[in-house]
């Protein structure tokens, strides 16, 4: 319902701006024109007051004899008359306030202090006994939120309540933020879309485009390891103990921020990681900016995974087991800082090329990194473009889906710090007997390696079809041109290995069973694992997943707190993991 501002009568109908507030334009201020829109209702001056007065006159006073009018009807008329009287008085005071404010705006007068006393109420229009005048209230000082004085409505003179079946004539003044703040927020929207999302409504406007997607994930795990022997022998012939374990841990607690800023092509990704077996620290796991020039070149700068393995790049959220295989853990690179590009030069054919500080320089300072860069690339082909993410067939592909790829990494690793200790990048490299490559006396008495060339080649393949799925990756690693602080009897160390996984979704979108074997062969030993796993997908996605797996570990050569492998471990490992992600 709207009431004409300039007319003398009452006009019924929908308001011109339902649910919106109208800001004053500069032109309207110059012309001395002002409008008030409150939830689709306009309060006219003096139209509404006169309209209410007309209603008051239309209701006759209670002077008829008791026998002429039904007493119940007369009581209702008297109640309506009193309500209209009070509404008329309130509207008159509000109209006087609006007139004063408009005069100041039209004259360009700055805000001033409140008058000494509130204006006198206008005389009652209807020929009835006037209500007692409200008690004056001291005018409050102007504030940033309310620079002009607003006459208060006395508690003893409230706006009468309106019954649900009676249309409201007056809407209370809206309280809240200034219109300028509302206008600033009007260009944003928030919601959930594969994460909590905040973005501008018009991303095509390059200067103001913005999107932030917030995701979180936690992996809570119980690990039990029972050894089958008490000790293992490292590469120097030293006996080392094998320890049992039984403990809870938060393996991964991650919070990621991703999206774009200024332009949808200028994107960013920030990944914070907390881990209870990593000194309970929170670290900047990944962070980069990238600019997507076209489908062929998306240039990134920052910190990310060195792309030396498909299983490594696929992440830890969608694994079949609680974590990656022993072979992947032994051969793969780590994270580093550098420049890399991704793209799709041909339909369903993807690549990544990276130049970085090294193969494993994730949390190192500049003086702990050598001067040699690492060069890494990966590519894969999704022939039918329907493989999707993850290894298990949650989607239940009616048509076969497949993926094949390859990766290659090279890095020269050399140098020692001022104390003569090899750079920490060396410590990521181990022989198949579990010993670090830089360990003193590994190849010759009192001799340690200080320089080598690292080569890694990997080939991978995967498929999905009607709940069945399988994936595998083969690794070939060369440590060439070994040099040290003395003669080294070998010039090169070669190892190769693979993992093979398969599974079946025996309850579609809910439960699957998986098996895995992992083998590492070549110089200085042999290692293997055999495992089975059961997954329960609570809501039919990877977001909430319960995993349990049992693994027979044989002579582990690697060390990583993520999957829980330790050098020399030989025994049974049981893990139960709950993953919750949003």
Image: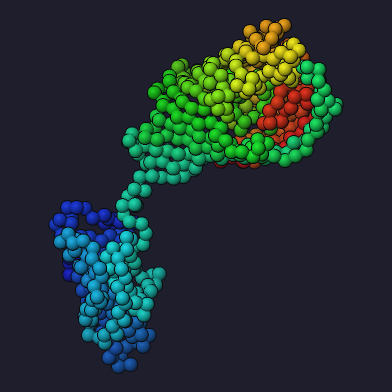
Residue 330 placement (x, y as % from top left): 68, 21
- How has the structure been colored for display? rainbow
- The residue at the point 36 percent across, 62 percent down is 175
Q: Is residue 59 above or below residue 337?
A: below
In which quadrant of the rendered view does residue 409 lie?
top right
Residue 485 placement (x, y as % from top left): 67, 12
- Looking at the image, how many numbered discs can be counted on the residues? 0
> Position of 132 compared to 353: left or right?
left
Q: Which residue reaches farthest right? A: 229
Question: Dividing the image into 4 quarters, which one contains the N terminus?
Answer: bottom left
Is there any visible trace of residue 455 in the rendered image? no
Q: Nearer the viewer, residue 455 or 541?
A: 455
In which quadrant of the rendered view does residue 201 lie?
top left
Residue 391 placement (x, y as % from top left): 62, 26
Question: Dividing the image into 4 quarters, which one contains the C terminus?
Answer: top right
Residue 407 placement (x, y as % from top left): 57, 16
> Position of 13 compared to 291: left or right?
left
Q: Is residue 538 above or below residue 331?
A: below
Q: Nearer the viewer, residue 379 or 247?
A: 247
In which quadrant of the rendered view does residue 528 lie?
top right
Is there any visible trace of residue 108 in the rendered image? yes
- The residue at the point 61 percent across, 38 percent down is 281
- The residue at the point 30 percent across, 93 percent down is 65
Q: Nearer the viewer, residue 401 or 13?
A: 401
- The residue at the point 74 percent across, 27 percent down is 566
Q: Is residue 213 above or below residue 495?
A: below
């Amino acid at each position: 319902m709207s009431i004409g501002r300039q007319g003398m009568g009452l006009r019924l109908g929908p308001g011109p701006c339902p649910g919106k507030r109208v800001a004053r334009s500069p032109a309207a201020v110059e012309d001395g024109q002002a409008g008030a829109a409150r939830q689709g209702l306009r309060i006219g001056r003096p139209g509404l007051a006169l309209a209410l007065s007309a209603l008051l006159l239309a209701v006759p006073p209670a002077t008829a004899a008791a026998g002429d009018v039904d007493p119940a009807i007369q009581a209702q008329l008297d109640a309506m008359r009193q309500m209209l009287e009070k509404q008329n008085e309130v509207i008159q005071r509000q109209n006087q306030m609006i007139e004063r404010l408009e005069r100041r705006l039209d004259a360009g007068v700055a805000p001033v202090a409140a008058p000494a006393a509130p204006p006198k109420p206008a005389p009652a229009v209807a020929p009835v006994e006037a209500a007692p005048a409200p008690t004056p209230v001291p005018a409050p000082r102007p504030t940033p939120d309310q620079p002009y004085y607003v006459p208060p409505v006395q508690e003893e003179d409230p706006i009468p309540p309106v019954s649900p079946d009676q249309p409201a004539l007056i809407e209370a003044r809206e309280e809240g933020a200034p219109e300028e703040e509302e206008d600033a927020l009007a260009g944003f929207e928030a919601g959930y879309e594969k994460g909590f999302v905040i973005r501008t409504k018009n991303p095509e406007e390059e200067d103001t485009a913005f999107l932030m997607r917030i995701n979180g994930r936690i992996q809570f795990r119980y690990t039990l390891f029972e050894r089958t022997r008490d000790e293992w022998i490292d590469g120097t012939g030293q006996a080392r103990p094998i320890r049992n374990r039984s403990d809870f841990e938060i393996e991964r607690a991650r919070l990621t921020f991703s999206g774009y800023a200024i332009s949808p092509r200028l994107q960013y990704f920030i990944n914070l990681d907390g881990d209870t077996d990593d000194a309970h620290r929170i670290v900047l796991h990944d962070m980069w900016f990238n600019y997507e020039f076209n489908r062929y070149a998306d240039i990134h700068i920052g910190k990310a995974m060195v792309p030396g393995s498909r299983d490594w790049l696929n992440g830890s959220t969608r694994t079949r087991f609680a974590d990656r295989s022993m072979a992947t853990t032994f051969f793969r690179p780590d994270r580093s800082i550098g420049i890399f590009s991704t793209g799709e030069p041909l339909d369903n054919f993807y690549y990544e090329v990276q130049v970085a500080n090294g193969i494993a320089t994730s949390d190192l300072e500049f003086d702990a990194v050598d001067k040699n860069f690492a060069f890494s690339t990966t590519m894969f082909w999704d022939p039918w473009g329907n493989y999707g993410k993850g290894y298990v067939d949650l989607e239940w592909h009616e048509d076969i889906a497949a993926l094949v790829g390859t990766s290659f990494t090279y890095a020269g690793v050399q140098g020692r710090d001022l104390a003569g200790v090899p750079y920490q990048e060396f410590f990521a490299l181990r022989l198949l007997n579990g010993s670090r490559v830089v360990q003193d006396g590994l190849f010759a008495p009192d001799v340690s390696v200080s320089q080598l060339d690292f080569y890694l080649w990997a080939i991978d393949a995967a498929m999905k079809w009607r709940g069945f799925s399988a994936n595998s990756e083969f690794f070939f690693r060369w440590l060439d041109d070994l040099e040290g602080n003395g003669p080294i009897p070998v010039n090169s160390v070669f190892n190769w290995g693979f993992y093979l996984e398969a599974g079946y979704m025996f309850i579609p979108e809910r439960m699957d069973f998986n098996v895995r074997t992992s083998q590492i062969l070549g110089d200085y030993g042999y290692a293997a694992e055999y495992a089975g796993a059961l997954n329960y997908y609570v809501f039919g996605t990877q977001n909430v997943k319960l995993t349990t797996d049992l693994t027979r570990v044989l002579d582990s050569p690697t060390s990583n707190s993520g999957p829980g492998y330790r050098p020399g471990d030989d025994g049974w490992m049981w893990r139960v993991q709950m993953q919750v992600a949003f």
